[in-house]
Amino acid sequence: MAQPLLDRYDCLLLDLDGTVYHGSEAIKGAISGIDAAHAKGVAVRFVTNNASKAPDAVASHLRHLDVPARTEEVATSAQAGARLLGQMVPAGAMVLVVGTEALAAEVNGVGLRTTRTYSDDVAAVVQGHSPDTAWADLAEACTAIRSGARWVACNVDPTLPTERGQLPGNGSMVAALRTATGASPDVAGKPEPGLFTEAARAADARSPLVVGDRLDTDVAGAEAAGMDAMLVLSGVTTPAEILAAPEGQRPRYLADDVAAVTSTAEALAVGARPDWRIDVGDDELRVAGSGEPLDLLRALCPLAWRHGISRASGTTDTAKAVVNTLGVGDIDYR
């Protein structure tokens, strides 16, 4: 008998940007999926790489979008960054903050002092997303890093999904400092496992499921933490990128959005589907049959990953149409 997904896991670790919302708009299906988890007694934790807001502000924003959320259900990369700094430098050390006041407050909360300008007593730099970060902020951090300060990045996501599309994320600003200093930061957020493991511990979860829209942060972070992952297509990742996913970034489940948590685990898992027949060619996967596009993507994944072939072609008009819908037929993305 098919097992409901929510019977298999006791906690959902949900990414936010691209999974639950785009900026000021909730993503279709997110609220119903979260409501279903709560009704089933499955814990929910909102785990975000965005370090710009305090947990209470994140929870308030979610509630404004009609997403049920409590402050204690929110885990941010700012919290993870502050915890990491607390392990790296002595109590009371001075930390130069590139980011919001919410990030500075988290750093203060672990017993460290904060500043916005370089001085000889700066022991570390912490960098998190802020829409107000400017050249002058990066210049202060550059000076500190070049002078030997430790460097922690809350996350390295290159883009931030919004209702306007993909905009520069913290990783883009981190890249500027990498170029200017020749140094690389210690990363506190996803794909490092700590953010997930701490959120699961806080929820007293033994079998959590990570749900997110990015291969290189959400899925890779789940893999690093030893957790299963469901990738949703409501954010930045395309079907072609999923077929080309390297080891360590391959989700167990695929879904359109969070509402899919009400389905069975078997329906969501990558693997063969009876409605689709796939033959492996020298440089493409040949598809016949008919059915849902997402089911075809689930069926293509194991073969694409095993054989290193991420291009598909339809052998019938119906199959060609679905392959084109997925966008995996015209370009070899290997």
Image: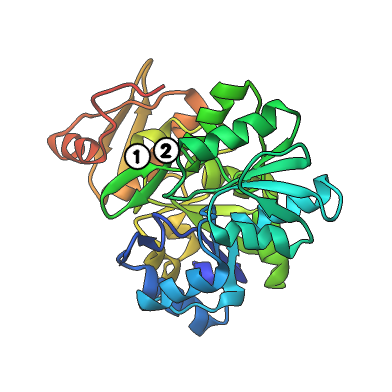
Determine contact: label 1, label 2, CB under 8 Å: yes
Q: Which mark is residue 242?
A: 2
Whole-angstrom CA distance, mark 1 to mark 2, is 5 Å
Against 127, residue 32 (above or below) is below
Q: Position of residue 317 (x, y in %)?
A: 13, 35
Residue for point 46% across, 47% down? 270
Residue for point 52% across, 30% down? 175
Q: Is residue 18 visible?
A: yes
Residue for point 61% across, 47% down? 116
Which residue is under mark 1?
A: 239
Against 288, residue 77 (above or below) is below
Q: What type is the residue that disc 2 sits on?
A: Ile
Q: Position of residue 72 (x, y in %)?
A: 61, 75
Q: Which of the 4 quarters of the picture holds residue 333? A: top left
Q: Judge from the rendering whether residue 151 lies leftward or rightward of residue 306; answer left or right.
A: right
Question: Foreground residue, 277 or 320?
Answer: 320
Q: Position of residue 238 (x, y in %)?
A: 34, 40
Q: Which mark is residue 323?
A: none
Secondary structure of the residue carrying tag 2 is helix
